[in-house]
Image (cartoon, rainbow, N blue to C red):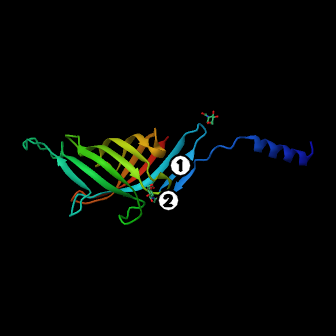
Amino acid sequence: MSKQNAIVMVLIISAMVPQIQSVNLKAGNWGTSLETKNNETVTNLQFYFHDTLSGKNPSAIKVAEPIDKSKSFSTLFCNIMMADDPLTETSDPNSKLVGRAQGLYGSSCQEEFGLLMALSYSFVDGPYNGSSFTVVGKNSIMNPVREMAVVGGTGLFRMARGYAIAQTHWFDNSGDAIVGYNVTLVH
Ligand SMILES: *[C@@H]1O[C@H](CO)[C@@H](O)[C@H](O)[C@H]1NC(C)=O
Ligand SMILES: *[C@@H]1O[C@H](CO)[C@@H](O)[C@H](O)[C@H]1NC(C)=O
Ligand SMILES: *[C@@H]1O[C@H](CO)[C@@H](O)[C@H](O)[C@H]1NC(C)=O
């Protein structure tokens, strides 16, 4: 076969290979989605969670605590908060809003500062606008890095499974905190 014919053959064969429908997506510097060989999509998200307890406009408010005050724990065991926390692209609270974390977290541990998180993380930016995933899991807030389970999602993240790595970026005595999230989703 001549060199020219070989090139023509390669061109014909590559035109016959079905094009994988691309679902490769990108949102600013905070999100990417890549399709894998087995038709699943892997999404990586990086954002910052701002939990504000202090001041006139807190984003998380206590909604329950032990009725019997003699049952009070230094770990705040049994205190439950409702949160509607902004998620931003960088650690600066004034950086671009990419979503909100909405739901409950409460102290579920008698002997350490540990929370049960039950929140929906829904997004408003780029291709992820309108999609959400749900985190349910223990958050050992005194550990610099912790992992929580993603148990499902909606929209683009329908049927998602995955995990969230959370790292405290900043906190103060009032309980206000900025937490960095790295989330891996398969959907
Ligand atoms: C991926 O999807 C295509 C088109 O729907 C299908 O033909 C192929 O068998 C799928 N591959 C896998 C590994 O499921
Ligand atoms: C997100 O979707 C809503 C509803 O469809 C739309 O009003 C809004 O403009 C969208 N935002 C962005 C940043 O695309
Ligand atoms: C995500 O993980 C990388 C690698 O560990 C780290 O450099 C980055 O700061 C993390 N992002 C957030 C938002 O925490």
Kindly identify the amino acid type of the residue bearing the numbered disc 2. Asn
Residue at the right extreme?
2
* Mark 2 crowd level (few <14, some 14–19, many ≥20, 10 Å Cα): few
Looking at the rendering, which quadrant does residue 38 occupy? Answer: top right
In the image, residue 111 lies at what x, y percent? Answer: 20, 41
Q: Is residue 1 left or right of residue 68?
A: right
Residue at the bottom extreme?
94
The residue under label 2 is 29
Q: Is residue 51 above or below residue 140?
A: below
Looking at the rendering, which quadrant does residue 136 occupy? Answer: top left
Q: Secondary structure at mark 1?
A: strand
- Alpha carbon of mark 1 to alpha carbon of mark 2: how far? 12 Å
Residue at left offset 32%, top offset 45%: 119
Q: Nearer the viewer, residue 171 or 184?
A: 184
Kindly identify the amino acid type of the residue bearing the numbered disc 1. Ser
In the image, residue 175 lies at what x, y percent? Answer: 23, 56
Residue at left offset 38%, top offset 61%: 91
Q: Is residue 162 left or right of residue 81?
A: right
Residue at left offset 65%, top offset 43%: 20
Q: Quadrant of the N terminus?
A: top right
Q: Nearer the viewer, residue 173 or 183?
A: 183
The residue under label 1 is 33
